[in-house]
Image (cartoon, rainbow, N blue to C red):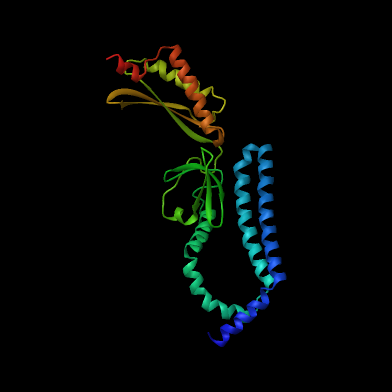
């Protein structure tokens, strides 16, 4: 070990004394509390202004980035105050080691900045990534946190979004298209069934009527038998009502089918 490196270690031991160590810990804890407080404030405001919920989440995400980055700089130069000689002495020997050991972390940090400004998706979006589908809870410095519809929290490193494809259902909007499929036998009254499904969709309390509601009809094989597929396409007023809307549509349509004696594919198959 060279003389310059020994001097660097001695300077480092002077900088990392107990009082400064405690000050750094308290500063980091304060930054964490500040970001936590911002999230709670945003949650309360979003309850009063639900139509601005996604915008608030996006603002908080950007502020959290700025707080962590700005706070980190203040901690280093405001509390530790490392001399230039120490930075030069440690910089050369540590750069290679840190670069190799933190390669994935640095890649995720860079990807986090790209996600923040390129915005392939935003906080509050419903996205599909691989086999995972859910709502983006947060976009952090290292990873994206996604809550599935089963209320599981999934953490995905930012770097994965740079190489793998991701599908966003609402792209920052509060409303989102939902599709629900229904199947009947070929002998059904197509116009009647289409009207039943359409009327059910437009009268749902979760539907967003400023955008078009449609029913698409096609033929599809069900258990090797040809059947009619009725796909209703409608927008929900808020992505958080996705499953509630689907449940409402299915419940109402199934009830209407029974009342109108609409023949389903499995009944047609059994009668053969």
Coordinates of residue 80 in the picture (x, y in percent)? 67, 72
Residue 181, position as x, y percentages in the image? 41, 27
Residue at the farthest front position: 18
Q: Residue furthest right?
A: 19
Q: Position of residue 58 (x, y in %)?
A: 59, 48
Screen quadrant of the C terminus: top left
Residue at image point 54% right, 39% down: 151
Q: Is residue 77 left or right of residue 145?
A: right
Query: Camera-side residue: 216 or 77?
Result: 77
Q: Is residue 129 left or right of residue 32?
A: left
Image quarter of residue 52: top right
Residue in the picture at 35% in, 15% down: 188
Q: Where does residue 200 sit, x and y in percent of width and height?
A: 50, 21
| 133 shown above or below 6 | above
Residue at the (43%, 16%) spot, across then down: 257
- Left or right: 8 in relation to 216: right
């Amino acid at each position: 070990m060279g003389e310059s490196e020994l001097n660097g270690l001695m300077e480092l031991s002077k900088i990392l004394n107990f009082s400064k160590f405690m000050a750094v810990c308290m500063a980091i804890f304060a930054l964490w509390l500040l970001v936590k407080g911002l999230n709670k404030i945003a949650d309360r405001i979003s309850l009063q202004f639900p139509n601005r919920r996604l915008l608030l989440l996006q603002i908080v995400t950007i502020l959290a980035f700025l707080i962590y980055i700005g706070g980190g700089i203040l901690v280093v130069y405001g509390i530790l105050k490392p001399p230039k000689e120490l930075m030069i002495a440690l910089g050369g020997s540590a750069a290679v080691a840190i670069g190799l050991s933190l390669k994935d972390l640095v890649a995720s940090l860079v990807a986090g900045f790209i996600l923040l400004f390129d915005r392939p998706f935003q906080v509050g979006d419903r996205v599909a990534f691989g086999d995972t589908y859910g709502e983006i809870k947060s976009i952090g410095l290292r990873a994206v946190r996604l809550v599935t519809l089963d209320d599981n929290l999934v953490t995905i490193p930012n770097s994965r979004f740079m190489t793998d494809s991701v599908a966003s259902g609402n792209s920052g909007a509060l409303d989102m298209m939902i599709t629900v499929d229904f199947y009947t036998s070929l002998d059904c009254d197509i116009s009647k069934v289409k009207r039943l499904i359409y009327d059910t969709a437009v009268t749902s309390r979760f539907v967003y009527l400023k955008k078009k509601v449609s029913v698409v009809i096609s033929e599809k094989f069900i258990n090797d038998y040809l059947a009619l597929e009725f796909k209703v396409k409608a927008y929900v007023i808020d992505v958080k009502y996705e499953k509630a809307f689907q449940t409402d549509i299915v419940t109402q349509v199934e009830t209407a089918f029974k009342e109108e004696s609409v023949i389903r594919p499995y009944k047609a198959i059994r009668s053969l």
